[in-house]
Amino acid sequence: MSRHATAYVCGLEIADETARTVFLLLAERTIAQGDRHHPEEIPETMGLELQDHDIPALAEQTGLVPEDFRQQLRELKKHP
């Protein structure tokens, strides 16, 4: 889990509970290169490993059906 990505999402104060839950779950799966003891070395761009076959289990974790989870992903991709 990337605590940097999780802290970033928490700091956004997203009002929509579902979007926040999905984004936080994704942040927990984020891969960040660099030394965790030197956060200044963590790059701004972090990778996310998410495969289509992961979606049903992730959707279940958030209380959504897979298609609703995918819709949340599409909406999150629209925002920089």
Image: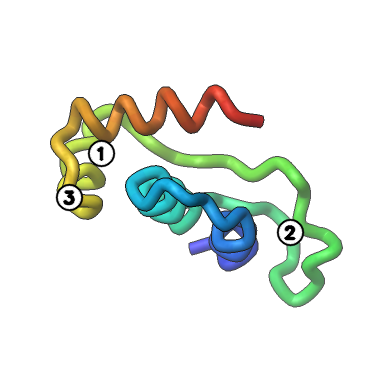
Looking at the image, which residue is at 14% across and 36% down? 65
Q: Position of residue 25 (x, y in %)?
A: 39, 53
Foreground mark, 3 or 2?
3
- CA–CA distance between discs 3 and 2? 33 Å
> In terms of secondary structure, where does tag 2 sit?
loop
Which residue is label 1 attached to? 54
Amino acid on which disc 2 is placed: Gly
Amino acid on which disc 1 is placed: Asp
Which residue is label 2 attached to? 34
Left or right of 60, for residue 23: right
Looking at the image, which residue is at 75% across and 76% down? 37
Tell me whether circle 1 and circle 3 mark residues in contact (CB < 8 Å): no
Sequence-wise, the earlier of marks 3 and 2 is 2
Q: Quadrant of residue 71?
A: top left
- CA–CA distance between discs 1 and 3? 14 Å
Foreground mark, 1 or 2?
1
Q: Position of residue 74 (x, y in %)?
A: 42, 23
63 vs 49, nearest the viewer: 63
| Number of on-image labels | 3
> In terms of secondary structure, where does tag 3 sit?
loop
Q: Residues within 10 Å of mark 2 (few under 14, many from 20)?
A: few
Which residue is label 3 attached to? 63
